[in-house]
């Protein structure tokens, strides 16, 4: 069995009388993207800071392992295995992009030759070679973010924490960053991502956890989470009006009619059993639909359903 990149049990943190993390469990397989979603103040950044050794977990927290190392007994080994890109860029605008990279290489104790080699390689990889000699203050937001991640990669981390990495970026720069993340995972890096962009989690994450009121409200793949929220349906469209009327009569009150589009809508989450049941009913009546589509709620629906609640301690619903 492959050792998880991150395994945390009963993770807790409070500031005074405000509980930020109320005993959450995290399990992140190596070589995947794990997204932690939640509203402002939900504790996403606090979780990143604990897992990256920047702050200590609260009393009562269970064991935490990052890259196979115990966070409490061997924090130095954890730091050597990870990279962190926070919400705010660590780029120094007063020096050039190349100088930022070389400074990071010095911090990682690389030789001058190795530092220059790694710098040139990463600047090229992130499309920053032409701008390498310019002050970083002249870079666009997207370029600064790419430089930020390139600096994080100087130490060849096995796990990278990206805390809301695309906040404030325009749509094109955001999509460029998604390609960067996909490239990292293709190279075997594990990415722990926090974001408020639901589309971002949908596009990138292998698994998503929704954080609310200090707890994990739900966890699963994007498709699994979408099935939690009511509103999924199966749409049948017919080219033949007679077939449409026959199907409507046969399915009865279960089907919502759209006479103009010759379409029927039946509640369903798109699971195999639901689809088989609908098709079996049509087959038994000798009716064939021209189009058959499954519609599920999107992650926006999931986010609002799971986080817009006054409940002080959400019930965890893990989808497998």
Image: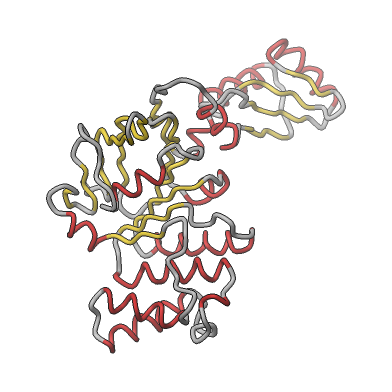
The colour scheme used to paint the residues is secondary structure
Q: Compared to 318, does 1 lie above or below? A: below
Spot occupied by residue 252 in the image (x, y as percentages of width and height): 72, 11
Spot occupied by residue 123 in the image (x, y as percentages of width and height): 45, 79
Nearer the observer, 6 or 51 = 51
Left/right of residue 190 with respect to residue 236 in the rendered view: left
Residue most extreme to the left: 73
Q: Compared to 135, does 212 lie above or below? A: above
Left/right of residue 230 with respect to residue 208 in the rendered view: right
Number of numbered discs overlaid on the protein picture: 0
Q: Compared to 13, does 176 lie above or below? A: below
Spot occupied by residue 101 in the image (x, y as percentages of width and height): 39, 78
Left/right of residue 292 with respect to residue 115 in the rendered view: right
The residue positioned 12% from the left and 49% from the top of the image is: 73
Which corner quadrant of the image does residue 103 belong to?
bottom left
Which corner quadrant of the image does residue 138 belong to?
bottom right
Residue most extreme to the top: 253
Nearer the observer, 290 or 215 = 215
The residue positioned 53% from the left and 84% from the top of the image is: 134
Quadrant holding the C terminus:
top left
Nearer the observer, 301 or 319 = 301
The residue positioned 31% from the left and 57% from the top of the image is: 159
Spot occupied by residue 313 in the image (x, y as percentages of width and height): 39, 22
Residue most extreme to the front: 16
The residue positioned 30% from the left and 69% from the top of the image is: 156
């Amino acid at each position: 069995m492959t050792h998880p990149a991150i395994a945390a049990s009963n993770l807790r943190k409070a500031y005074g009388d405000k509980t930020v993390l109320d005993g959450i469990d995290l399990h992140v397989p190596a070589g995947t993207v794990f997204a932690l979603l939640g509203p402002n103040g939900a504790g996403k950044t606090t979780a990143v800071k604990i897992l990256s050794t920047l702050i200590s977990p609260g009393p009562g927290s269970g064991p935490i392992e990052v890259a196979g190392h115990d966070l409490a007994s061997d924090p130095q080994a954890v730091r050597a295995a990870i990279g962190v890109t926070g919400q705010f860029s660590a780029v120094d605008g007063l020096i050039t992009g190349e100088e930022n990279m070389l400074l990071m290489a010095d911090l990682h104790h690389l030789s001058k030759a190795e530092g220059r080699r790694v710098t040139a390689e990463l600047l090229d990889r992130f499309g920053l070679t032409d701008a390498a000699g310019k002050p970083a203050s002249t870079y666009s937001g997207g370029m600064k973010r790419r430089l930020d991640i390139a600096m994080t990669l100087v130490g060849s981390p096995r796990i990278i924490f990206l805390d809301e990495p695309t906040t404030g970026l325009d749509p094109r720069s955001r999509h460029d960053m998604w390609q960067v993340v996909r490239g990292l995972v293709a190279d075997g890096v594990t990415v722990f991502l926090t974001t408020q962009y639901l589309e971002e989690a949908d596009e990138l994450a292998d698994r998503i956890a929704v954080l609310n009121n200090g707890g994990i409200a739900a966890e699963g793949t994007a498709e699994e989470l979408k099935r939690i929220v009511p509103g999924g349906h199966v749409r049948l469209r017919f080219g033949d009006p007679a077939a449409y009327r026959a199907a409507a009569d046969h399915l009865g009150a279960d089907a919502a009619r759209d006479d103009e589009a010759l379409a029927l809508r039946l509640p369903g989450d798109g699971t195999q059993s639901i689809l088989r049941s609908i098709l079996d009913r049509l087959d038994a009546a000798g009716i064939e639909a021209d189009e058959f589509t499954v519609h599920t709620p999107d992650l926006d629906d999931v986010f609002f359903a799971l986080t817009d609640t006054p409940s002080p301690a959400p019930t965890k619903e893990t989808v497998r």
